[in-house]
Image (cartoon, helix red, strand yellow):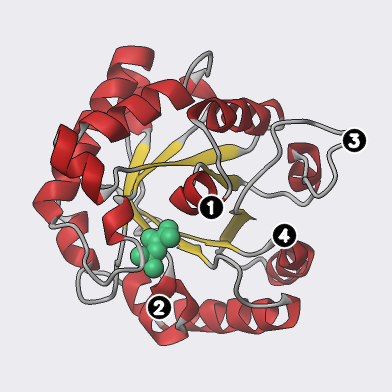
Amino acid sequence: VGKRTPFIAGNWKMNLDHLQAVAFTQKLAWSLKDAKHDPADAEVAVFPPFTDIRSVQTLIAADNLPIAYGAQDVSAHDSGAYTGEVSGAFLAKLECAYVIIGHSERRTLHGETDADVNAKVLAAHRHGIVPVLCVGETAEDLEAHGPSAVPVAQLRAALENVEGAKGLVIAYEPVWAIGSGQAATPQQAEQVCEALRGVLRDLFGDEVAGETRVLYGGSVKAANIASFLREPNVDGALVGGASLDIDEFSSIVRFKK
Ligand code: PEP
């Protein structure tokens, strides 16, 4: 049910200042042009640090580049006395289509709970921004609970009182696969992505479940991207390290099924 254009998302994390971000985005655009990239084959998105977003927006808008962009986090609050936070209203003003929420680095290094993640998903929706909602288990979780239990529980908690029709992208990112060079197998990714789609079906029905893209993330590179995208429930990738290498990221975007 429904058409799910593959989604290739580069999470730059805390890398590339605004000048480097502009140079990188320009190179990415040239590479897409050289490859005669068809946006129907893959939607390409970059997730720069907050301080880069205005510059990236200006470049993309000026040349009408076929690259989407978003932020790596958003405040649960809309405005006020929240020092250091960035509101969804500000991201919407910068025409961010997407925002990453619940990345494992936010959960583990910054203590974000499932309730925080839920509040951020609701905040993104208040401002018309599509969350790229990350879930995933640690190696210990995998050992103790099997492959799907923790990601499924995280997804259910993150989606409390959320309206699926407002748009979601889900990213399954096993913590043990992030930055480790040890990607999940395509079969492992498929098994969990299928279970996550089952949660979407249960909460929102067949139409939303059929239209929502579920990504895999964790040590994705040019050499393994096609194997993930061959799986029926894997609709793209959230790419960390390899999204900072222009040749590697360009090859990932040009994946062939
Ligand atoms: C990530 O942090 O979202 C990620 C998938 O990182 P990497 O590709 O470097 O494993």
Q: Amino acid at mark 4?
A: Phe
Identify which residue is drawn at 77% across, 52% down.
Answer: 94
Task: Please identify the residue farthest to the right as the structure is shown.
Answer: 81
Q: Residues within 10 Å of mark 3 (few under 14, many from 20)?
A: few
Q: Is residue 142 above or below residue 218?
A: above
Residue 105 lies, with reference to residue 157, above or below; the image says below
* Spatial CA span between label 4 and label 2: 23 Å
CB atoms at circles 4 and 2 under 8 Å apart? no
Q: What residue would you read off at disc 3?
A: 81
Q: Which label sits in the foreground, 4 or 2?
A: 4
Q: Residues within 10 Å of mark 4 (few under 14, many from 20)?
A: some
Q: State the CA–CA distance, disc 2 to disc 1.
A: 30 Å
The residue sitting at 29% across, 69% down in the picture is 180
Q: What residue is disc 1 on?
A: 109
Any part of residue 233 in sight = no
Mark 3 vs mark 1, CA separation in Å: 23 Å
In the picture of the structure, the residue carrying the numbered disc 4 is: 50
Left-right relation of 98 to 254: right
Left or right: where 203 falls relative to 243: left
How many residues crowd mark 1 within 10 Å: few (<14), some (14–19), many (20+)?
Answer: few
Residue 141 image offset from top left, x and y in percent:
24, 40
